[in-house]
Amino acid sequence: MINADTPDTQSGMTAFLRRRAPVLIVVVLPTFLALVYFTLIASGQYESEAAFVVKDSRPTSRASGSSSSMMMGGAGTSMAMAAASSGAGLAENFAVNTYLKSHDAVDSLQQRLNLVAMYRHPDIDILSRLFYAHPTPERLLWYYLDHIDVVFHEDTGVTTLDVRAFRPEEAKRIAEELLKLGEERINEFNRLVNENTIKAADEEVTIAENRVKDVQHRMTVFRQRSGDVDPTKSSIVGISLIGQLETELAQSDTQLAQMLRNLNASSPQVLTIKQRIKALNEEIEAQRRLTQKTKGVYANIADYDELMLDREFAQEAYMTSASELETARAAARQQQVYVVRVVEPNLPGMATYPRVFLMILAVFVGSGLTFMIGRLLITGMREHAI
């Protein structure tokens, strides 16, 4: 009797399999394969997490924040604080995040850590490992982006960094190196800011300094050529001396006139005063010849005054440019940005990827949706064919 029922049972099973073949092939089989792969074959991945924030040195307005807090209440206070924290270094934060996901970051990691070797350990399953021993930059970048997450939270200004690798210590090393790369890129930003902000002002100071040196050199050459340290003072001294001599001469002439009223012209007193007058005249004439000889003096005075004016302008320009340089340096210091590590990279203690249940569920749901869509398409095609 059992033998008689066996063909019916087999035919019933065959009919059942034929009816359910699409479901078995499209839904059950992929789900079963996913179950086998993720539970028995897939290599575990360890995740190291870190967090950082990019801050700047620009002063924040406390007054406006406090007044807004008074007007908006408790909720407004927290919103204002979030806006203030996210506004600081916002562009730099996005720039660092973009850099950490770029070819430059991958190249640096490859040079420092040998990223390819880390993702090609022999015990990594064939579907998870990096397939190429010498991948192109694009392939390495694609694989790298599948194993890191860099997310910037605008409400807090904090960037979270998640790195997955097949060794816990390697995940931590990659995360640590990425933080260092971000800090180096921020330092590069600061260097460029310093160069762009200070370079122009520094060049102006150099030009003004060279101008002062040039004027000073011209004054030295003038003094060596004229033999006069300060023609203005020298001319004043010469004119003053002539004036004194002429005053003494006038006094002597007056004294001689008074003596001639009472004394003979050949008297010793008269002769002495005449000799004094003669000497004064000779001295005055000598001083006048000296002044005319250096006509020189007035030309030197003009040249000297021009040099003094040039030096005054050069010194004023130098002081102005030096002040602008200090202002530029202060502005550059206020534009400095830096990375603050909020959470250091951790050494993971257990593999967190792949997430077996979620992955199997995703395969099952995806297969089910594929089956349903395919069934609807086939049904629609049959209806239209009729």
Image: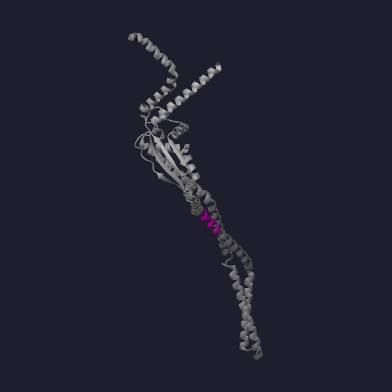
The image quadrant that residue 113 belongs to is: top left
Indicate yes or no whether the magenta region holds residue 182: no
| Spot occupied by residue 317 in the image (x, y as percentages of width and height) | 57, 58
Q: Residue placed farthest to the left in the image?
A: 1
Residue 161 visible from this viewpoint: yes
Where 297 falls versus 364 (above or below)? below
Snapshot quadrant of residue 293: bottom right
Name the spot of residue 11 as percent of width and height, x first: 40, 12
On screen, residue 341 above or below 227: above
- Choose top left, top right, bottom left or bottom right for residue 28: top left
Q: Residue at x 66, y 86 (%)?
A: 257
Q: Is residue 159 left or right of residue 306?
A: left
How far across and down, in percent of the image, does residue 168 sit? 36, 36
Residue placed most toward the observer, 134 or 160: 160
Give the position of the N terminus as an image quadrant. Answer: top left
Q: Residue furthest bottom?
A: 262
Residue 72 vs 376, above or below: the answer is below
Is 320 magenta? The answer is yes
Q: Position of residue 129 (x, y in %)?
A: 40, 30
Q: Does 126 sit left or right of 205 as displayed?
A: left
* Nearest to the observer: residue 222 or residue 179: 179
Q: Is residue 131 visible?
A: no
Region of the chain picked out in magenta, as a range: 319-328
The chief SS type of the magenta part is helix
